[in-house]
Image: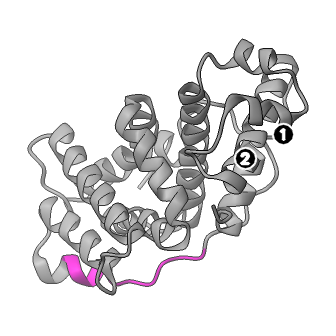
Amino acid sequence: MPPLPLPLKVALNASLAAGPKRERTQSLLLQATVQVIVQRGLAGTTMQQVAQAAGMAPGTVYNHFATRDELVGRLAVVIGQSLSRVIAESSADVEDGAQRMAIGQRRYVWLAAESPAWALLLLEVAAASPHLLQTLEVYTLADLRLGVRQKRFQVPSEAAALDVINGVCSSAMRRVAVGAAPPRHDVAAASLVLRALGMAPAEALAVARRPLPELPMPAPAAPTAGRAPATARGRKR
């Protein structure tokens, strides 16, 4: 399993930075899980191998995570949060809610192109873990509401809009990850989402085609788990 792209890898390492007591042990276990998955893939990862990579007894792993699925699920949440934070930071200076939405859509598809195995891991866990989807929706919902306030989007239901956004993004990620997508599938998928949110076809395509901002290299500081992103909490437009 190949490594994550560098900005995401740095963000993930920052998210896994050791904290006090119990959090420190869990961070070490999550870091060990990344090592094992990179070496053996998800299917070949066991709790015993994670314990060995972390230099701990298997019982210690089970004291923090009851099952392998719980451990991998927690890791997927951290990866998803890390990617979402990096995307949000890259578009911090973008005022247009529609462009912010397109950036988010395209960057997740970019992950599928750059690191197919990691993208498929996220999709697999998201299908079985509603908590992951709810965590990532904080960012999407902020951009959706911004677009509505700017009258860029017209949606009868936020929940229905999120279903469209998540559905198109997930399907596009999977198609790209398995090598079944045509060129510029990220742009086509983002354009379709913008059209579904009420934009005219030509305008949606023009916005989706705008150059992606560079991903920042995150500072090595551990964020507070479960905290809403700054761009989602106090954004003023």
The secondary element bearing badge 2 is classed as: helix
* Residue type, label 1: Ala
Q: Height in image: 172 above or below 205? A: above
Q: Measure how far apart labels 1 and 2 are at the Cα level.
A: 7 Å
Is residue 138 in view? no
Query: Between 211 and 172, which is closer to the camera in this rendering?
Result: 172
Quarter of the figure with residue 18: top right
Is residue 173 in view? yes
Label for residue 36? 2
Query: Between 229 and 174, which is closer to the camera in this rendering?
Result: 174
The span picked out in magenta is 204-214
Where residue 193 sits in the image (x, y, percent)?
A: 21, 63
Label for residue 237? none
* Relative side of 105 to 222, left or right: left
Quarter of the figure with residue 16: top right
Q: Are marks 1 and 2 in contact (CB under 8 Å)?
A: yes
* Residue type, label 2: Val
Q: How many marks?
A: 2
Residue 4 belongs to the span the image colors magenta:
no
Q: Quadrant of the C terminus?
A: bottom left
**Residue depicted at x 10% and y 74%:** 200
